[in-house]
Image (cartoon, rainbow, N blue to C red):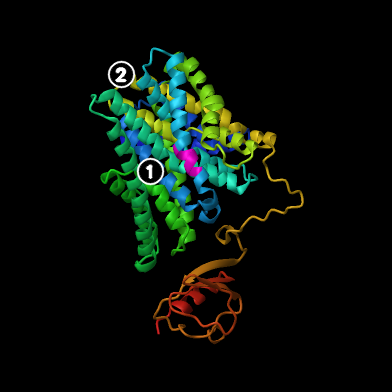
Amino acid sequence: MIDSFTLQALVISTLILFSILSSKLFFRFGFPILLIFLTFGMLAGADGPGRIDFSDYGLAQSIGIFALIYILFLGGLESEWDSLKNFLSVGIRLSIVGTILTALILGVLIHYLFPVLGFMESFLLGSIVSATDAASVFNIFKTGSSDLPVHLKKIIEFESGSNDAVGVLLTTIFMNLITADASFSGFQFFRFFVMQVLVGSMMGYSLGILILYLMNSVKLGYDGLYLVFITASVPFIYAVTTVFQGNGFLAVYIAGIIVGRNKFIHKKSIFRFLNGYVWILQIGMFLCFGLLVYPSRMVNIWVPGLLIGVLLILFARPVAVFISLFRVKLPVKEKLFISWVGLRGASPIILATFPIAQGLVWGDLLFHIVFFVVLVSLLVQGSLIPRVAQWLGILKKDPDRKIYHPTDFDNIEFPGMTLQELIVPYNSSVVDKALFEIKLPEQSHILLIARGEQFLIPSGNTQVRGGDVIWVLAKDDVMPIIGKTFMAVA
């Protein structure tokens, strides 16, 4: 008889593997990959063929927040500050003014179209879906749309990475207005907003500087501990910022920007590790969200869900973008594209669990409406991004341009040979010796030496120093000899 843990491991791993393999097929038809995971989660849920009964909204909320902070941190790491800083003011306008306007415009429309929802409930629903989703946007730009102008991608990425904080603020505020008494004044509203933004920004900046300093100054005994250190730092930043009444989402994104714009030890390995780790979190998060949904309930809300989704995509978002970017010198076609790439995804679903956790009467209905809006956004907006970009004529046009893709040596196979990365111990017998003095086998060649923040192309007179990272290409049978040579203690 199979024990419960083995059965759970089998079901979860099968679901993830099948989703990943299927995503390759669906991506060819232009479907966003994350939409595939949502769909498989629904199919595996209590209403689908999988019959997995999962209704723990609190756990789903925790999983979503945990995944989102890593998504935001990695987005900050990869933001390329030099390209971003020239358009920072545009991104801030969109993330703050644009998000607030989207929530208010959509809230008014929802109330007058569906009077059964009061003003506060309508504004709450508008707030939940007001922020664009970092997971969806970053994923779209990593898997497609590579020919978009760099500045446009950076503006959209910054908006999606920073406006989650505003979405959380608006959702929290309207929930307090619904559940709290009249003592929740306008001053408290303003104070809460300012505290969240200021404390979140300051904590993100200061903790980012601290992490960078520790990464470069503390010599850990094992290389793998640097990966553990950076991984543990992300929830630490979020938690400490939240304790001090700041916005943890904003803090981790800013910390990611601070760390990513500087050099630090094992940067390439950490980037590669976090990319894989974030993929695992995204897949688990979207599968989990799919499990929460009851498709049978979607039948009753598809009309309002579709209408709200259309109003969001075609009216509320474009109006908010054009107002927030008033007098900003961007072509109209680029503003239209920014309006279109307002993808909804994990962030609204996470926020939609808040009303349920608070026990609001409309909680379950709001959750399923939000989920339907997210499906509409990913299916319509996400799948049409390349076509809209082409229709607006904003793709780069350079027929003579040759595209060179960077090569990752770790992924190259050398028949009969090995590319090995060696770290020279400080007490090695080869320290302070020139390469020509070190007797290496003929079937070997030293390609590169990394020393601190410098990369050296070695010659015979290049001296080896303790702590050097050396890349050696050699025949398989002589690599052990090379390793012993560099590791031998003086």
Q: Amino acid at mark 1?
A: Phe
Q: Earlier in the sequence, mark 1 or mark 2?
A: 1
Residue numbers of the magenta segment: 91-96
The reply to whether residue 134 is visible in this rendering is no
In the rendered view, would you say 364 is above or below 166? above
Give the labeled residue for mark 1: 249
Identify the residue at image location x=44%, y=21%. Answer: 108
The kind of secondary structure element at disc 1 is helix
Q: Position of residue 431 (x, y in %)?
A: 45, 83
Q: Position of residue 216 (x, y in %)?
A: 39, 66
Query: In front here: 180 or 234?
Result: 180
In the rendered view, would you say 122 is above or below 87? above
Identify the residue at image location x=48%, y=35%. Answer: 98
Query: Is 382 displayed left or right of 239 in the figure?
Result: right
Q: Residues within 10 Å of mark 1 (few under 14, many from 20)?
A: many
Residue 32 among magenta residues? no
Residue 94 among magenta residues? yes
Identify the residue at image location x=27%, y=34%. Answer: 188
Give the labeled residue for mark 2: 361
